[in-house]
Structures are given as C-alpha cells and as structure tokens.
Image (spheres, rainbow, N blue to C red):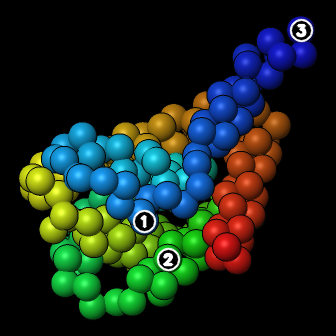
Amino acid sequence: MHVRRLVSQGVFPLAVLMALATTASAHQLGGPMGGFGSGFEHPLLGGDHFLAMLAVGLWGAQMGGRSVWTLPATFPMIMCVGGVLGMMGLVPDNIVVMAIAISLIVLGGVIALKWKAPEAVAIIIIAFFAIFHGYAHGRFLPAAADPAAYAVGFVVSTGLIHVAGVGIGLLLGRYYQGRIIRLGGAFIALAGIYYLLA
C-alpha cells in the first residue's frame, strides 16, 4: 500500500530515474564510436551529464512561466558551441570535469533552495555550464565514425532528458509544496560534490 502511494505521487519514478544514473563514465572512450546511436547514448551513460541535463528541466519546471522552455532550449544550443570548442581541445580535461561537477552542485542547489532567478540570470547560468558539457562531448567528435550524426545524437538525447526533467518537475511539483523536487535537487548537488571529490 505504501509503495502504491509513492508510485501514485510520483516519488518512485523520480527515485528510479536518479538510480539509473551511473558513474562518471561519459568521459571515457569505451571502444569504437559510431554515429547517431553513440551520440544518443553518451549523455545517458554518464551520471554527471544525465543529472545535469535532468536538473535543467527540473529547474525550468520549478521556475515556471517561459523558463519551462527557455532553459531546456538554451542548453542544447549552447552545448553545440561547447562541442566545437571541445574539438579544438583548448581547455584541459581536468578543468572541464571539475566544471561539470560544479554544474551539478549549482543546478542541484538552486533547485533545492527553490531559487526563482530572473530569467536572464538563469539562462546565463545554464549557458555557462552548457559550454562545458558540450566541450566534453566535442572531445569525442573526431573519434566518431560519423561526427555529424554523433553530434545530432547527443543533442537529441540531451533534449529528451530535459523534457523528462520538465515532465517530472511539473508532475511532482504539485505535491508537498514542491518538496520532492527540492529533495531531488539536493541529491543532484550531493552527486556533484561526489564527482568533484572523486
């Protein structure tokens, strides 16, 4: 009965989604890279990327108004810019990995605190971190069999994770004055601390 109530309130699906996020394997090449399929799975296999992209959707839903779509729309566009920079290899990898971990701390933190930032400020924060997430993906582009298809794959996957975040945020935001979403944000921030220390 207790499990049924959790499922009906949407707590269980959120817990399952967060549990599916694996360790920071998104930065490791695990064999020959393909095209669209490899790009599509890349954000799904790295817990740091997955949680950050989910957080963008959650924050947009939590803020409401135009932010429901402006935040998730901004991230993939700026991520493409970061991808081009990643192909150039201008920034040391350790700085990129650190910035990605910090993105989890910041995005999770603003959700946990339920900070309704001015839309322009929220977009700047999202865009800043999108550059580093795109950079990490761009580092793999030259190794892909079909770089263009790979890029399309990771952008589409990113967009779908954002949509999932928005959906979860809108669904669970109605319960307990949004405390479930805030708890999810705290989890994301803690995951960021873990990645930063690891």
Q: Nearer the viewer, residue 147 or 34?
A: 34
Inspect the image, locate mark 1, and give the three-letter code of the amino acid beneath it: His
Q: Check disc 1: other Cα within 10 Å, few if <14, some if 14-19, many if 20+.
A: some
Q: Dots 2 and 1: beta carbons under 8 Å?
A: yes
Q: Quadrant of residue 188?
A: bottom right
Q: Does residue 151 sit above or below 20 in this rendering?
A: below
Q: Check disc 3: other Cα within 10 Å, few if <14, some if 14-19, many if 20+.
A: few
> What x and y, as percent, mark residue 167?
51, 35
Inter-mark Cα distance, 2 to 3: 42 Å
Q: Which residue sits furthest top?
A: 1
Q: Does residue 197 sit above or below 66 in this rendering?
A: below
Mark 3 or mark 1: name the one nearer the start of the chain: 3
Q: Residue at x 32, y 74 (%)?
A: 135
Residue holding disc 1: 27
Residue holding disc 2: 97
Q: Residue at x 46, y 48 (%)?
A: 45
Residue holding disc 3: 1
> What x and y, as percent, mark residue 181?
70, 46
> What x and y, as percent, mark residue 50?
50, 51
In this rendering, does residue 189 appear at all?
Answer: no
Q: Which element carries disc 2, helix, strand or loop?
A: helix
Q: Residue at x 73, y 27 (%)?
A: 12
Q: Quadrant of residue 141?
A: bottom left
Q: Does residue 48 sit above or below 57 in this rendering?
A: below
Mark 2 or mark 3: name the one nearer the start of the chain: 3
Inspect the image, locate mark 2, and give the three-letter code of the amino acid beneath it: Val
